[in-house]
Image (cartoon, helix red, strand yellow):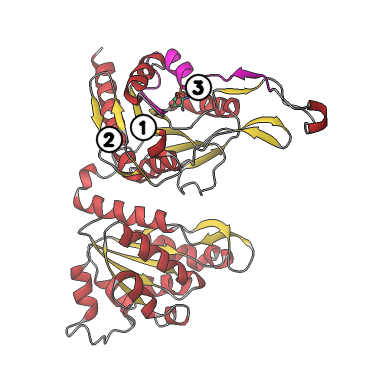
Amino acid sequence: MKGTKIVLGVGGGIAAYKAVMLARELGRRGAELRVLLTPSATRFIGAPTFGGITGRAAITDLWDPGYPGEVHVELSEWADAMVIAPATANLMARVCAGMADDVVLATLSCMNGPRLLAPAMHERMWLSPATQRNAERLQKDGMQLVGPVRGPLASGESGWGRLAGAETIADAVEQAIATARAPEQARPLTGRHVVISAGPTQEDIDPVRFISNHSSGRMGFALARVAVARGARVSLVAGPTRIAPPEGAELHSVRSARDMQSAIESLVGDCHILIMSAAVADYRPAEIAEQKLKKADKGAEMRIELVKNPDILAGLGAARKGALPVLIGFAMETHDVLNYARGKLRSKGADLIVANEAAVGFGRDDTQVTLVSEENDEVLPPGSKLEAAARILDCAAERLEAAEASTTKS
Ligand code: C5P
């Protein structure tokens, strides 16, 4: 988001502290920020807090001495987009009524560029007829709502009304700006079904032990986020991970390779792009002990017999015959990465293999991958997993178009 300018308005709800995380996330992506607080937001969070994050204290009133002109007019002309997080029920109602009696609402009412609101409130407030009516009205008036999502609420209960995550809101802002700049290319995966596998699998030994690997799920989750932002319907089949899966994708949680296989097979019927980024265990214990294995029974050595797991990607690659237009696999190796990747392209019947070295990929936010296909090897520069995901999905979309063009011809 380098070079983009964003106004972040903060409403007066308990989730106001999360606006700091959002400011940090937008800043981390390279955006320049101005933060505005409503008077009631200042009861939850202080203006100087944002100074530490953005380099400028937040603005709290329409008569800010830093702006000799009219602050709302100047900022709305300066910004590429404005996002309000959290947007309370009261703030939403005031926006609907066209009120402009604080710096947040006045700036919003002046904005020409994308306007996003991330609501956060108690579930009963969110579901109340007035708020639902206002949510609809705001969208008709051209504003985009991000969330709320379901989850734990400040009251200790759980339900709808939780502020969407900082990454989800930042993704929506980024996408809204891209859409405003190039509407024709905005959501190129609209109407497409993308199935993505992510994370490790766990293969049980007994009721308390399993065999697994270090995969964090970050690469698959990054792919899912980019695919959602580009308009796709995304099915995310994920093994157990420590990080939260992205919002907006349909999550299928699995544990073993065989669970993953049946989940994926039930989803590929109308799938346009399948990306197997999961680190699927190649072997599983031949038998799962019904009771915990005891040391005393086993003596100084213990052997576990393993049997081969189904190769999900290779199975789908061999059986695709026209269905499943784009199939992408991953190859993570400790050595000889590109040679192994080329071998996998053939043995798995994939269109593209994303190759990387184990030392570079596991558990981190950044990566360096090479996209290996029959045509060429494309070495991507080191960067974030989101950047790699964006390029992988560009290639997937190009291949999908080519596959569809050749079916139409024949
Ligand atoms: O053979 P290898 O495990 O190195 O291949 C990696 C690729 O194959 C990944 O895309 C992975 O998701 C997929 N795979 C699979 N089923 C397995 C093992 C790997 O689909 N049992």
Q: Quadrant of residue 23?
A: bottom left
The quarter of the picture where the C terminus appears is top left
Foreground pick, 324 / 343: 343
User: What residue lies at 28% left-to-right and 17% top-to-bottom?
Assistant: 407
Point out residue 84 in the picture as x, y percentages from the top left corner: 37, 67
Q: Which mark is residue 145?
A: none
**Amino acid carrying mark 2 in the image:** Asp
N-terminal label among 2 and 1: 1
Q: Is residue 404 in view?
A: yes
Magenta extent: 304-333
Q: Secondary structure at mark 2?
A: helix
Q: Quadrant of residue 377?
A: top left
For label 1, the crowd category at 10 Å Cα-Cα, with few meaning under 14, some 14 to 19 and many 20 or more, is many
Q: Secondary structure at mark 1?
A: strand
Foreground pick, 120 / 278: 278
Foreground pick, 166 / 367: 367
Give the alpha-carbon distance from disc 3 to disc 1, as whole Å. 20 Å
Q: Is residue 294 in view?
A: no
User: Is the residue at mark 3 in contact range of ligand 1, meaning its CB lies under 8 Å from it?
Assistant: yes
Give the alpha-carbon distance from disc 3 to disc 2, as whole Å. 24 Å
Q: Which mark is residue 394?
A: 2
Q: Which mark is residue 312?
A: 3
**Amino acid carrying mark 1 in the image:** Asn
Q: Report the mark closest to the observer, 3 or 1.
A: 1
Which residue is denoted by mark 1 in the rendering?
Answer: 356
